[in-house]
Image (cartoon, grey):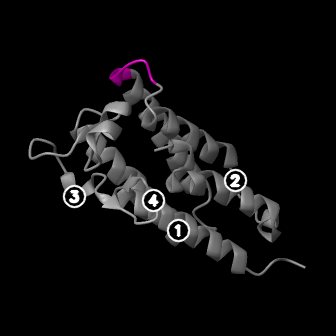
Amino acid sequence: MQPWFDLFYTLIFAVPIVCLSIKISTVPLRGVWLFFSFAILNALVKWGMTPNIHAAALIKVAALICITIFAVQNRTLCPRGFLCLLIGVYSNAAVRMANKMRMPATAPLQFIEKFPSYTLMTTKTHLNMLGDWINLPASMSWYSPGDMFIIAGLAICFLELSIRKQPR
């Protein structure tokens, strides 16, 4: 599996780029750099590019701060979308914190061994219902309910901003 083709991160990077390149660019979206910072910091942890689990925890906290500030700054533009986004981010954070900064997943062992930010979902892991157990048929990745909330939040924001009446 190639994580660079992961649907989740494709959406995280693609939605703001699309929003900035079409008519939505007239919407005063504030702190876009915070959104990209969140995506990059999250990717560092997900793909195991941190020196140890403590660094991963600090990076995850920084990512949460970035996305929270971004959502609060833009809460009036699409409140439902940003609320959905925050629910997803914080549910993923909760399950990671409950499992020593590792996301429990039902993925094959080869995947789990390749990415140290994951752990095999067992009866000893906590908050399994929030872990990565959703496998989409067209994807070689596993997703958590939090990931689905994040994707839904981004989609809601994209739709709300794209159908919004533009000033003349």
**Image position, residue 99 (x, y; %):** 22, 38
Q: Is residue 76 above or below residue 59?
A: below
Q: Is residue 47 visible?
A: yes
Q: Identify the mark nearer the N-term, 4 or 2.
A: 2
Q: Quadrant of residue 88?
A: bottom left
Number of the label disc, if any, that sits on residue 129:
3
Q: Which label lies toward us, 1 or 4?
A: 4
Q: Which mark is residue 139?
A: 4
Along the viewing direction, whichever of 70 and 150 lies nearer the viewer: 150
Specify the farthest residue to the left.
123
Q: Give x and y (percent) for residue 151.
A: 49, 63
Residue 2 horizontal side relative to residue 162, left or right: left
Q: Name the amino acid type tagged 1.
A: Gly
Q: Say whether marks 4 and 2 touch (CB < 8 Å).
A: no
Q: Is residue 137 above or below residue 31?
A: below
- Work out how far the residue at label 3 is from the one at label 1, CA to CA, in angstroms: 22 Å
Which residue in the structure is indicated by mark 1? 81
Within the magenta stretch, is there residue 82?
Answer: no
Looking at the rendered image, the disc whose residue lies closer to the viewer, 3 or 1, is 3
* Contact between labelled residues 4 and 1, with CB atoms less than 8 Å apart: no
In the image: residue 32, left or right of residue 11: right
Q: In the image, which is nearer the foreground, mark 4 or mark 2?
A: 4
Asked whether the residues under the numbered discs 4 and 3 touch, taking CB atoms below 8 Å apart as contact, a structural biologist would say: no
**Cα distance between the residues tagged 4 and 3:** 20 Å
User: Residue 163: which disc?
Assistant: none
> Residue placed farthest to the right in the image?
168
Q: Label 2 belongs to which residue? A: 30
Question: What is the three-letter code of the residue carrying label 3?
Answer: Met
